[in-house]
Image (spheres, rainbow, N blue to C red):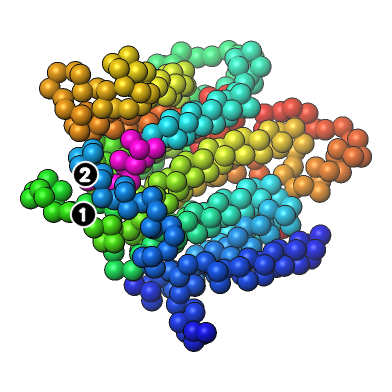
Amino acid sequence: MIWQLDLIILLMVVVCGVAAISIRDLLGAAIMFGAYSFMMCLLWSIMGAVDVSFTEASVGAGVSTVFFVAAVFRTTRRTSD
Amino acid sequence: MKRLGLVAVIIFGALLFSVSFELPDLGDAQSPASTHVSPYYIEHTLEDTSVPNIVTAILADYRGYDTLFETAVIFSAGLACFFLLRITGRKAPKARFYRHLPTGLTLRIEKGGRLPEESREFERIDSVWVPSDVIINMTCRLVVPFIQLFALYVIAHGHHSPGGGFQGGVIFGAALILFAISNNLRSSTRRLSERSSALLGSGGVLIYLGTGLLCILLGAGFLNYSGLSVLPGLDPVSARSHGILIVEIGVGIAVTAVMVWIYYNLASAGTQEEGL
Amino acid sequence: METVGALIIAKYNYWAVVVLIVIGLYAMIAKKNLVKKIIGMNIFQTAIILFYVSIGAKRGATLPIIEHAHGHGGHAVQAADYINPLPHVLMLTAIVVSVATLGVALALAMRIYFHYGTLEEDEIQKKIIGNEPAPGDGTG
């Protein structure tokens, strides 16, 4: 486990997490959630948990993001907070 | 309310932070988590089950009971989505939109009237319609079979490389969802209807349960795959390896079907007529 | 008492987990939009998964897949050479459960939108308490 790479990706994870809950457009929040999920997958790969990161890449950055976009399509895209 | 919430979570975070000094150091090989049960699994997996991927062996063999209920949880989530959203034929909205191809006019037909499906001049469109793009259509048609083949590889090779039933099942489901997004939802529903995906989902859980019951019938305990060794050509070690493969296939089928089922219900808001 | 540098290198993953838990919990409590609350729930769940995975890490050890398995038989497998696989197994189930919960939560949010016409929590509360007639059960 290379600790420098670990620290950089941890920083990106926190930034993506804060962005995902602060964007005012719900479609943008769904896409930022997909990016957050992918950064988590990289983090677990670096720590050696390959099965967990494979699952998170396919589930979080794949299917979960599609579910969010489908739900935003059927409801509304604007939010006031 | 926001300020109160911020103060409350910051106090909670400070409490967690003060406790984090008691946790074992990162990377410590003598930490309590790594010295009680897990050395047994690392040292004995290869001679008990002849499966090199330790995570797959623990998931499907040593702790197979948990995985059975995890598959049941995924199926019941699909079932819950179905009960929440599905609107049956009688209450569904009845207006349909058709487009006349030579002139580009759109027709709106109310109260359930419909034009024949195979007509050359009229094509059925969604109420929110964009013209279909040749590049997206052809690219997705070319790519989807390769994604499905890769998903089958991931399921079958889960013994020797990272992967297994769950990951391969999700990738297969994602390939079907890609086909539904690039063409319209109806062309995907014609190939794999919602009823078939629901039946496949329950079929996957039943495969897993059936393997456990087969082991009881052949004399060993529930989900003890060495009981399968009475079948010809198998000794107890390779019987466990094959038992792991069968339950991984069951999990893969269940997960594929449930991902597609939840997508059909979410994207069409229950009507199965129009989608993303 | 170790130096501050050694302390940071030993525990920085746990501090990142605490920060992510605080972000997720804040989103679930203080945001008004239902979809933002659901995103906060998922951030919380992945932070817990990060915690368990970092407990299982071992310095200098390799992935939990046994090398040279069917080639030369006969070397003993040392437990200290491989990363602890047990937290990975538990977290696979946790990821599955989180996607199942996400599907049901989004279906519930869609039904609430079809009934009340909005996804903001304060407007929904006004419609319930003020006894305004709900806009009806359209299918959006």
Q: CA distance from mark 1 to mark 2?
A: 9 Å
Q: Find residue C93 and report its horizontal and vertical position in percent.
A: 46, 42
Against B122, residue B132 (above or below) is below
Disc 2 is attached to a residue of which chain?
Answer: B
Residue occupied by mark 1: C77
Q: Residue type at mark 1: give it.
A: Val
Q: Residue B9 at what x, y percent from top left?
A: 71, 63
**Dot 1: what SS?**
loop
Q: Residue at x 49, y 84 (%)?
A: C2
Relative to B232, B195 lies left or right: right
Question: Mark 2 — residue?
Answer: B46
The magenta span reads B52-63
Q: Is residue B53 magenta?
A: yes
The residue drawn where x is 63% and y is 71% is B18
Furthest residue toward bottom: C3
Is there CB contact under 8 Å for labels 1 and 2? yes
Q: Residue at x 91, y 35 (%)?
A: C131
Quarter of the rendering containing residue C9:
bottom left
Q: How many numbered circles are shown?
A: 2
On whether disc 1 and disc 2 are found on a single subunit, the reply is: no
Q: Is residue B182 above or below residue C44?
A: above
Decide if residue B80 is on the left or right side of residue C34.
Answer: left
